[in-house]
Image (cartoon, coloured by chain):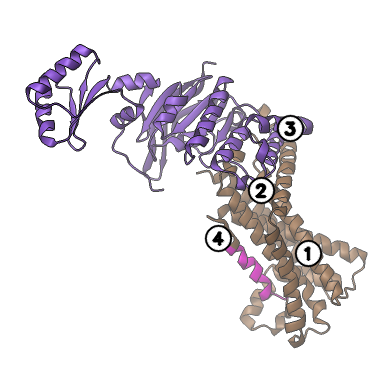
Chain colours: A brown, B purple
Amino acid sequence: MSTITAPLSALVHDSRVMVRRGLQTSMRNPEAFFIALALPVALMLLFVYVFGGAMSTGGAYVDYVVPGIILLCAGFGAGTTAASVSHDMTHGVVDRFRSMPIAAGSVIVGHVVASVVRNALATTLVIAVALLIGWQPTAGPGEWVAAIGMLTLFILALSWAAAAVGLVARTPESANMVTMVLAFLPYVSTAFVPADTLPSALRGFAEHQPMTPIIETLRGLWMGTPIGDQAWWALGWCGAILAVSAVASARLFRRRTS
Amino acid sequence: MAYTVEVEGLTKSYGSTEVLRGVDLVIQSGTVHGLLGANGAGKTTLVRILATLLGHDGGTARVDGHDVAAEPALVRRAISLTGQYAAVDEVLTARENLLMVARLRRLGRTHAAARTRELVDRFGLAAIADRRASTYSGGQRRRLDLAMSMVVPPTLLFLDEPTTGLDPRSRDQVWATVRELADTGVTVLLTTQYLEEADQLADRVSVLDGGRVVAEGTPEELKTQVAGDVVRLTYGDATAYEAALVAVGAGVPEATGDPVLLTLDVPSDGSPESLRHLLDVLGAVDALPRRVGMHSPSLDDVFLSLTAPSQESFR
């Protein structure tokens, strides 16, 4: 049918409009943005200066903890994303979008891209503060590019998962609460302590949950610790989360019609 | 094409609750059609099906010649939806909202900006165009909502309870805007629970009750369907009221009384002779009323006589 002559170019065009909307919206909520930036930095200072003395990770604790803080930070960011998707879905504006001749995916793509941009800013700040307080990565340019690529993929996957949560949730508040789980996952991983310090039950979980390979990969790239097959696990997890979330959110967006 | 909307035998259930039980509706192109019904009568469900937001179970619905189920993309090109809860992005300003819709409707940058300026002026949004929509009054928000619906003038404009919750002044402004839009030739499907609104704006009205259209016609036709003009006699005490009821009822069986309000409605052509005759009858039994007035049926009377005792929805 002639109306769907170029679905991809329509998706790209409409998504650009929606990304602009998402970024405008993000900038209009300075409190949430400030908290999203300040909280991870405060957490990092807390871990490095308060708990750090008691941790024995073989070296400066800041060198160990940076990847974990970045993932925590992304978890908080996911809460904002889920809440803003849910807000859209529970307000009149989504009816307008859905009754317009636009690409269905563009609304969610707009949210996801805005989420990635917000998270990238927060991550950059965390890295800058880490460098200021003595983080000394050994990575060369190649490793930095790989680490940034890994992080971007992770943030993209997490943002899309958060968007799917936002589509399912009945209220923005509950969407935010659900994603709190994501913010807690790094605690039961190798983010803050090596897995062999955990009790055996937790250790099994920590070694097999997605956060651990991502953290180990980032740490390996930045600090030169062994990565082994962790990078493949990290890529696999992120790819799987991304694929499932993208398909699920496309379906949920169409289904949430009544 | 003569008809912008053609609905036949449309049904929709949520679980075991039948919301639409076979709705038939046609709307002539270029007219304003009022869809009148109490809360829970199925108005919003019908609008959502026609706007491709909701699937239906049985029957057919065509908008601008396209089946809503089979060709939703074509239907979406022909419609604009102005929702019960204004469909605006509250975080953005009026200008940004309009620009966003213009870009989504594939207007080029300069064209989109020009169209935005035009609509800001036309819908009286100039003073607030650069404030966030969340700071607007109800009336301002509805006007922005309407402006967004007119970025690309649609073939069919849905106005789903456009004045619910507005103060009288804002309501009058929205009405004026709707009349202007109607004059441009756009077909309007207006849902409302206010009969006055349908009377003011609609060329034809369908009364929806219990998921069915129970009456259809121009507001005038509907009014004559119920009853003609009546003389309304108002009493101050029950004894005189009872006496009058008996005396009048003997000659005019169509007369109806309200024992609570102590009023008696007697069909009448309003001529002096018939009034004199009526008062003579009453005077003979010593039951002259406290007040006498002529009363023409309103759409309220139509509505109350046509619809079942109100089934409020507590959704």
Is the residue at mark 1 from the same chain as the one at mark 4? yes
Q: Mark 3 belongs to which subunit?
A: B
- Compute the Cα span from label 3 to label 1: 36 Å
Find the distance from the CA under tag 1 to the CA under tag 4: 25 Å
Q: Which residue is mark 4?
A: A174
Lower sequence index among marks 2 and 4: 2
Mark 4 nearby-residue class (10 Å; few <14, some 14–19, many ≥20): some
- What residue did someone put label 2 on? A108
Residue A164 rendering spot, x and y as whole percentages: 62, 54
A233 with respect to A254 (left or right): right
Q: Secondary structure at mark 4?
A: helix
Q: Residue tagged by mark 1?
A: A123
Disc number for residue B112: 3
The type of residue carrying mark 2 is: Ile
Instruction: Tell me if label 3 and label 1 are in contact, CB under 8 Å.
Output: no
Q: Nearer the viewer, mark 3 or mark 1?
A: 3
Mark 2 vs mark 4, foreground winner is 4
Would residue A61 be seen by someone viewing this image from the given angle? yes
